[in-house]
Amino acid sequence: MALTARELNPNIVIVSRAENESSVKKLIKAGANKVITPYEEGAIKIAEYLTKREIVEIVDFIINAEPVQYAIKQLVLDKHHPLVNKTLREAGFRQKHGLLEIGIRRGEKRSLIHRLMKS
């Protein structure tokens, strides 16, 4: 499949999953940019959990949640928007709209605002 995808679109990013180490070189040769093995996948998940636990918990919650539909959206405000320079509490997204804020970015500074609340 990697070879066919590469032929159809030479610029496509191809990430493949190999069941064992012996298949990694073959998939790279066939055109995959990145090949992940089950062991590597597990190691990545462990590393992400240890370094970015809050984000992993939120994403796992969203992926495993049923039957409610969740979506992650980014809200970009221009400098004249009434919410600029307000805290998330002052904005009242949860109270007014039932939204869970995950994070905030002001300029290049990013912060995780809420831990996932377990109900």
Image (cartoon, grey):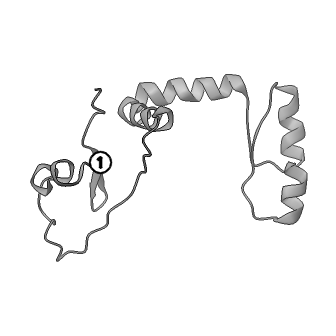
Give the x, y percent position of residue 51: 41, 30
Label 1: few (<14), some (14–19) or many (≥20) C-alpha neighbours in 10 Å: some
> Considering depth in this image, is 30 or 102 the residue closer to the camera?
102
**Residue 19 image position (x, y, % from top left):** 80, 26
Residue at the (73%, 29%) spot, across then down: 37
User: Who's the residue at 52% across and 23% down the image?
Assistant: 46
Quick check: 109 left or right of 84? right
Q: Which residue lies furthest to the bottom in this view?
A: 80
Q: Of residues 97 and 89, which is closer to you in this image? A: 97
Q: Where is residue 111 in the image (x, y as percent from the top left)?
A: 27, 46
Residue that appears at 31% across and 67% down: 76
Look at label 1 and name its amino acid: Gly
Residue 108 coordinates in the image, percent (x, y): 31, 59
Q: Circle 1 sits in a helix, a strand or a loop, which is it?
A: strand
Q: Is residue 11 left or right of residue 85?
A: right
Which image quadrant is residue 65 in?
top left
The residue that disc 1 covers is 103
Q: Is 85 left, or right, of 43 in this rendering?
A: left
In the displayed structure, would residue 13 be above or below residue 63? below
Q: Nearer the viewer, residue 117 or 24?
A: 117
Residue at x 42% of width, y 33% of height:
61
Q: How many labels does the image show?
A: 1
Position of the C terminus by quadrant:
top left
- Nearer-the-camera pick, 32 or 114: 114
